[in-house]
Image (cartoon, helix red, strand yellow):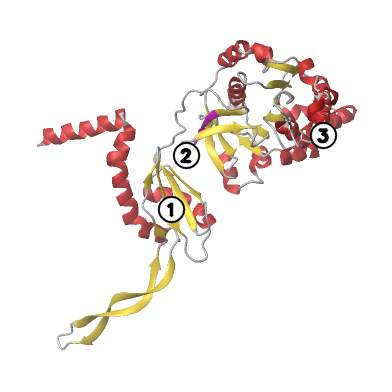
Amino acid sequence: MLGVLAAVAAGFWAWRHWHYRSFWLTIGFPLTAISVRASWRKVALGCGLTKKRQRFWFTTVPGLVASTGVVRVRRRFQRIAVDTAPFMWLPMPTRHGWRVTLHTLEGQIPADYADVAERLAHSWGVHAVRVSSDRPGRVRLAATMRDPLVKVDELPPSTELLKVTVGRLETGGPWVVDFMTVPHWINAGATQSGKSNLANALIVGLAPQPVALVGFDLKGGVEFTPYASRLSALATSRAECGGLLDDLVELMTDRMGVCRMASARNIWQLPPGVRPVPVVVLVDELAELYLMADKSEKEEVAKTSTALLRVAQLGRAFGIYLFCCGQRIGSDLGPGVTALRSQCSGRICHRVNDPETATMTLGDLDPAALDSARAIAAETPGVAIVASQDGQWYRARSFYVSEQAAEHAARLYADLAPSWDEVMAVHPHQTPDSQTA
């Protein structure tokens, strides 16, 4: 009998180890669903999610005292206050755990459940519990049994224009950087936090697409020079960045004229034969554009800051998108950084060395996101807090993309890189008469 039990246990272990998904759907999830439903009332009571409601209940009340001194107890069916838990639907399995929908009680909001998400995770013995709400009066709890960010897959090819899958979210879903939906991004992170790896993933994903890549490399060119074959323009100093930003402002003005003459609100309403190529601007070490050694650089910094802000404010409609990276992004750099941040809906915060950078990146979104960003360990490069396009924030991890892989992609698709003169050669008078009538 012991041998049979040992063989069965070994079989279950091998099944779980070699094909966890089928084991989870067949054995793990049914047992978990029963446990979650059975323990929900106690868990809700412990987390403070119950409400007192009047219910008819059998109660025991003391009766008369017998001559022997024994208290006679009798049962009575009466109305008393009972702790009532929110109604829970049947849990449903997911790839990395399960999800369940709850009906909120009177006076409850999704934030009440988000505040006790960590308590719920510990009560059920899962890695994490995320809270969302798709309609009033409903709250969805999504539990992950184990951390899906421990190991991520390889970078998949990008099939849609200006959309790159750069990693995986903590929910198990893809982490997508979609410039069509979120045009401008801020990517903050300390050295060895995964910030440059994310830029490599973007270059690999955008290289085979019909887009123009522009690099602002304030490290003297050491970051983006190996990818110069796929870049349409590259600036490696603040003076060069200022000149390139002036070109981008001029390009934006020309495209305004094209759209105005064609009665279009943006370049995507233009016919494919007239539509100019979209431009993705990659900025490395954003703080270097704002730092001043003395007052003599104040005018240059102000000019550069103004041009970059103009591109961020008006560039989306005319096919110019920003992806700004930096180790240090703080309000002490000047009002230009704060104004630029307000134009960047996409926020990515890797591990940072100072809380001011995390606050500058995520502080105006959700205090819980700020706490999670400060808790990122140095042993987990690539892990970041992402403000997603659905209005929520997630822990995410980017796929590992080496410099060699990014250089290979840049050389392989070098023929797709339009020259800067070709990008700038879009003027209103070149629009066909049929489109300007």
Q: Quadrant of residue 402?
A: top right
Residue 100 sits above or below residue 105 on the image = above
Mark 1 closeness class: few <14, some 14–19, many ≥20 residues within 10 Å: many
Q: Quadrant of residue 199?
A: top right
Label of residue 260 in the image: 3
Look at label 2 and name its amino acid: Thr
Residue hosting label 2: 171
Label 2 element class: loop
Residue 365: in magenta span: no
Task: Tell me the CA gap for discs 1 and 2.
Answer: 16 Å
Which residue ends up furthest to the left in the rendered image? Answer: 1
First of labels 1, 2 by sequence position: 1
Horizontal side of residue 245 vs 69, given as left or right: right
First of labels 1, 3 by sequence position: 1
**Residue beneath the point at 83% across and 33% down:** 306
First of labels 3, 2 by sequence position: 2
Is 428 in front, or is 348?
Answer: 428
**Residue beneath the point at 72% across and 37% down:** 330
Residue 219 seen in the figure: yes
Mark 3 closeness class: few <14, some 14–19, many ≥20 residues within 10 Å: some
Residue 35 sits above or below residue 144 on the image = below
Residue 193 seen in the figure: no
Residue 104 sits above or below residue 437 on the image = below
Task: Tell me the CA gap for discs 1 and 3.
Answer: 49 Å
Residue 169: in magenta span: yes
Task: Tell me the CA gap for discs 3 and 2.
Answer: 43 Å
